[in-house]
Image (tube, rainbow, N blue to C red):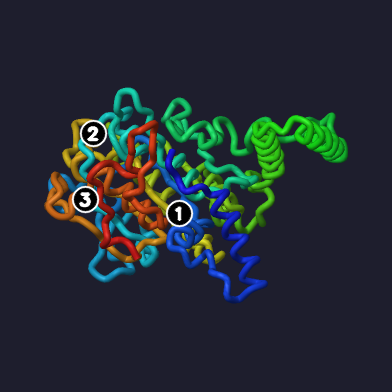
Amino acid sequence: MNLLNRRAMLKAAGAGTTAAASNMAAVDVLSQPALAKELTRKGKNVILLWLAGGASQLETWDPKPGRPTGGPFAKIQTSIPGVEISELLPKMSTRLDETAIIRSLNTKIADHGQGYFLMDRGRRAEPGLEYPHLGAILAHELGQIDSQVPDYVSMYTSTEGRRQGSAGFLGARYNPMFLTDKMIPEDIQLPDSITDTDHNDRAALRRVLSENFARQTRDPGINSHETAYERVRGLMASDHLFDVEREPQAMRDAYGPTQFGRQCLVARRLVEAGVPFVKVARAWWDSHGQNFETHRELCADLDHCMSTLLDDLKQRGLLETTLVITLGEFGRTPKINGSLGRDHFANAWSCTLSGCGIQGGTVFGKTDADGQTVIDGEMNAGDLFATIFAALGIPPDKEYMVGSRPIPIADFGSEPCQEVLS
């Protein structure tokens, strides 16, 4: 892949800094645009709040009360004049100054499997080419080569049924760390039979033997092995990041006792430690029956946990470098079915972007009076991904080379939505 070599860049940056310290006439390497842009996006993070199954835009960000499609819930005024959202999100209604609502997604695919693929990769599947998913791309673009914390953590959600996501042509280095059963990863803690002293002594012995072997062999593959080993040691040392019991009781109480709340707290701990991408999923939005009872419960959890997360990130000075996304496979039908449910709908639905690189308090796009079609600002999956990349300082027109073929980081023809970018 024809990518900017981060190791060379960081080495050059370090050399430039040293030279500048000894010779003020030296050219500052950070003045070079490509290097400056690369460095400015380091330290940025993403938390994806994945609404597995497809949340209803009509019960969240684009309510239509009083219409045949509107359902029983009212809309409420938010902290942004003229902007109203569902009454099921009262806490978020007071926190939209850091959030942009996009009401005009038209992604066309209303099938769980294909819809998930599209909203996970920003483009449709193509035979013979395995595209990386969003988390892998952002781990690749935002992560540090020598980082000792995970690049990408994906929290468990029962509705997705199996582990989802692949780094595709980016390679296994950027596959996620899956938490399938619990929030603390398996196999990164020492067995009870090995003490910390034993572990450190073994590492020291291994390092001496490895260095001697490297001097004698002079094989560049030895360095890759050493890097991989040190990364594993770093991951083992980061096990505490997944333990919410290390948080003060008041903070645990603030996020609440639900699985979603505890995972949001872990997500904050991870991005604070430098993890580039964390996916937190809230399950069971697939409300073909009893949609309104379902959303009353789920929206209460989303409203509380999302608002607490944004407050926590903001108070810690992390929101300006952390992009929080709420997204699912698709939305729900404006038409209410015979089971008082809403079915799959991908022609006019909503998502939100908060924090890093986003113009808070904005609402982009518009649907018709019944929420059936987009009448202004239509956005597809590629455009949404281009907007996410732009918010993080990643050029949406950047290309990877897969063999001799250029692959744009956002789908062909995609454009970022400038109206929601700061």
Q: Is residue 232 visible?
A: no
Q: Secondary structure at mark 1?
A: helix
Distance between the alpha carbons at the discs numbered 2 and 3: 15 Å
Q: Position of residue 364 (x, y in %)?
A: 24, 58
Which quadrant would residue 116 be assigned to in this image?
top left
Q: Nearer the viewer, residue 59 or 43?
A: 43
In the image, residue 16 above or below residue 50: below
The amino acid on which the numbered mark 2 sits, given as a three-letter code, is Ile
Q: Residue furthest bottom?
A: 24
Distance between the alpha carbons at the discs numbered 1 and 2: 30 Å
Q: Quadrant of the C terminus?
A: bottom left
Q: Nearer the viewer, residue 359 or 363?
A: 359
Q: Is residue 307 visible?
A: yes
Residue 109's mark? 2
Q: Which residue is mark 1?
A: 304
Which badge, 1 or 2, comes first in the chain's sequence? Answer: 2
Are there few (<14), some (14-19), or many (20+) residues within 10 Å of tag 2? many
Q: Tell me which residue sits at (27%, 29%) in the image.
A: 111
Q: Which residue is mark 3?
A: 104
Q: Are marks 3 and 1 in contact (CB under 8 Å)?
A: no
Q: Position of residue 135 (x, y in %)?
A: 45, 41
Distance between the alpha carbons at the discs numbered 3 and 1: 25 Å
Q: Tell me which residue sits at (42%, 42%) in the image.
A: 2
Q: Secondary structure at mark 3?
A: strand
